[in-house]
Amino acid sequence: MLKLKKRSPVIMELRASVAFFERMMNLMRRYIGWEIVFLAYTLVNCLTIGLIGVSSGDPQRVLYLVIGAILWGFLSLIFHELSENIAWERWEGTIEHTLMAPILRATHLAGNCIATVIYGLARTALILVVVSMFLKVNLGNANLFAASVILAVSSLSFIGLGLIGGILPLLSPEKGPQATHIIQALILLVSGVYYEIEVLPRWLQFFSKISPATYTLKAMRLALLEGKGISDLKGYIIILLVMGIVLIPIGYIGFRIAENYARRAGKLSRSG
Amino acid sequence: MRQAVIVEEVSKYFVEWKKKPVNGKIIDRIFSFLRWKRKKFYAVNKVSLSIREGEIFGVLGANGSGKSTLIRLIATLLLPDSGSIRVFGHDVNREELAVRRMINRVSVEASFFKKLSAWENLAYSARLYGYTPTEARPALEEIFKHLELPEEKLSGSLENLSRGMQQKVAIARALFTSPSLLLLDEPTTGLDPKSKIQVQSFVRKMNKENGITTLLTTHDMNEAELLCNRLVIMKEGRIVAEGTPTELKKLITNGNGKSEVAVTLEEVFLKLANEGN
Ligand SMILES: Nc1ncnc2c1ncn2[C@@H]1O[C@H](COP(=O)(O)OP(=O)(O)OP(=O)(O)O)[C@@H](O)[C@H]1O
Ligand SMILES: [Mg+2]
């Protein structure tokens, strides 16, 4: 039989990191029906919320709500895709194959994160285009560069949250994915997606302060509604960066610990 | 001769939560959660064995005797609770990456992304093992030729392939990376007689020509006799017998005067793997 040449470890890791993006593209093509369904659902959701703003008669209100809907769509997608990844591979039955691949866990997770962010950005761009065709949103005042920077740094902290969310399905095949849904719902509640966090009860506002989504939404609205630039938003950018820099290693280390727990307790798969 | 795998006194237990019976008293019912008891269940119990480089080593045993658990321990998918496992000198606990680079596994159930085609699944694996799909393709095509897997089947969604075909794709996926150690967990279960023979002869060919050390579990005694240089029989997590097929047969002929030519491996299995001692 043909013998394939052995590769240097660096090349192996680099090639492996592409595997997750390619897999995602292939899955998208095969599940195109569901892609369209989810896209349509998110779109209708954004439009509905935008129309609540239209009915209020205040154009700024429309933009305020649309920013919330679209940004939440992006952030929750990253969190959801990353945290459900293990649960989904367990359901497909591929989890053992993926986890025993001869690559660093860091490569595996980074490959997954990059693929997910690209997917999220592409979907969000599409939604943005359609929504702006339906609702007359006025971006004349907006600072789009600052908005892109906010989006980039907030992705980091949501990657961190997604990795942390991914720990739970490793620990418990059934309760883990249930818990990640609850976490996602809590972030939606406390982060001021459709309202200012001041309307929340005091004790809940504490959670608002530790949710990266709160700062993302605040900063994004300042950039798009009031045209604030990077220098005005410095504080938010630093907070989001710090959150990303803290959360990503916690997610990675937590994942490693949970993976070892799963290998000890036999939680990966038991059939055969 | 170099040892490919050395398993020393390895144990693996799983925790089961058992509920003690509750009697009718209301207070007992309220506190019934206190009655959950943690119980250790040993799936692999103080197992030691060594597999020589270049050999096909068989693990036989009844359902639930711990064969797949042993394979998962060697494959770094489970961590041993005690004992040590070395694969070509690398400890599965401390050097998992080095071990993973040398092994591949075929599990009983074909583990694929069901909606993706065989080629798409294989492209994913190729990349995980450091090859581009284009590099991997000739090796894969050659394997498919041997296993008589029609190429036109490989572009459709994998869930539409028969179980036997899926199993062949899984075997190709494990072999194209030319692992130094191949772990085969019931590779021919569910295959028709012809496919079975194809897979068996391919496993032997890979072992002969490329010197791939192979660990094989099977419930097919003919297969075990045909392929394996040496065998162990497991029972309730322990090894109860070890040797070449002929040596194992001698074990049960001693004493009843029968010649070992007259007994089958099946008789050996029924005697050693099932009977109480
Ligand atoms: N992850 C796990 N969690 C809990 N129990 C497990 C797990 N994996 C295996 N077991 C238990 O350990 C025992 C050994 O299982 P194993 O799968 O190793 O048996 P086997 O010899 O491969 O059986 P079969 O011939 O049916 O494939 C069984 O009782 C099984 O229920
Ligand atoms: Mg088994």
Image (spheres, rainbow, N blue to C red):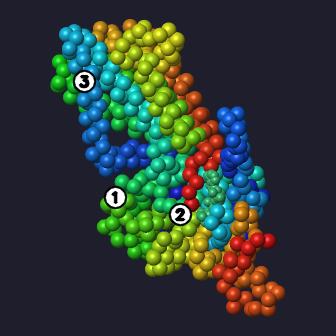
Q: In this image, B95 relative to A108: left or right?
A: right
Instruction: Give the residue at x 52% y 57%.
Output: A6
Residue A165 in view: yes
> Numbered disc 2: what chain?
B
Tag 3 secondary structure: helix
Q: Is residue B254 above or below residue A229?
A: below
**Mark 2 residue type:** Val
The x, y position of residue A226, in whole percent, is 29, 8
Q: Quadrant of the C terminus of chain B?
A: bottom right
Crowdedness near tag 1: few (<14), some (14–19) or many (≥20) residues, C-alpha within 10 Å = some
Q: CA distance from mark 2 to mark 3?
A: 49 Å
Q: Which residue is mark 1?
A: B157
**Mark 3 residue type:** Thr
**Mark 1 residue type:** Ser
Q: Is residue B98 above or below residue A177?
A: below
Which quadrant holds residue A129?
top left
The x, y position of residue A134, in whole percent, is 17, 24
Instruction: Give the residue at x 66% y 85%.
Output: B264
Q: CA distance from mark 2 to mark 1?
A: 20 Å
Q: Which mark is residue A48?
A: 3
Q: Which residue is mark 2?
A: B108
